[in-house]
Amino acid sequence: MIMQHRLSECIADFLLSQKVIKKQEKEIYVYGTQLVISSIINLLICITISLLLGELINGLIFFAIFSSLRRFTGGFHCKTFIMCNVVFSSVVALALLSNTFLGKVFENYVIVMVTAIFNLICILLFSPVYNENKKLTYIQKRRFLISSIIVYAIHIAFYLILLIVFDVKLNIIVIGDLIVSLMIIWGVINNIVMKK
């Protein structure tokens, strides 16, 4: 995290020296640059694990599903950048291995429906998950909840269109959304434990 912060500050300082940004905007650009660097690192982690497991396409689909929904739902957050990368690596590996070894389970329409309902309930009840580092106003919470529902609906629609129109069962979508729901629950439990 320190190296990432220093790199972000160097980039912001460069933009400042080139008069691209104003001095009062520097911290915003440092934070934004950190988010971009973090996203690039996560994508590279996902690509690396996907290539090692021979699942590049599923890995990229998982990354898109996971990051698009989790952005609005929140969930468990690690305290350090290193631990965040370790957990994310584990999540990617878990998703791809689940898809490989348990993917047939998600070909059962009842299991897909139960999983979809479970995910929706998690989103409706707990999204967005409170985070000490990203406190949201009431209006922001409502927007994040609505965005979570919309993104999840898009995922389900995409899954169903592929299934109905092309007879393609892209189970990594269901698995990705399920993992986001589990991260939501983990985040809620972690918040309860931290308050005690």
Image: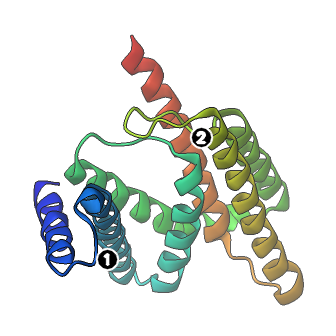
Q: How far apart are marks 2 and 1 (CA)?
A: 26 Å
Residue 128: image tag: 2
Task: Give x and y (percent) for residue 20.
Answer: 27, 78
Task: Look at mark 1 in the image and give the residue it sits on.
Answer: 44
Foreground residue, 191 or 47?
A: 191
Q: Earlier in the sequence, mark 2 or mark 1?
A: 1
How many numbered marks have been drawn onto this rendered protein structure?
Answer: 2
Name the residue type under label 2: Pro
| Residue 185 found in image quarter | top right
Give the left or right position of residue 25, taking residue 147 as reference: left
Task: Give x and y (percent) for residue 129.
Answer: 54, 37
State the residue at coordinates (49%, 70%).
Answer: 63
In what element is the residue under mark 1? helix
Name the residue type under label 1: Leu
Foreground residue, 53 or 173?
A: 173
Relative to 27, is 56 above or below?
below
- In the picture as drawn, the residue positioned furthest to the bottom comes out as 166
Give the left or right position of residue 94, taking residue 159 as reference: left
Task: Give x and y (percent) for residue 122.
Answer: 68, 39
State the residue at coordinates (39%, 10%).
Answer: 196
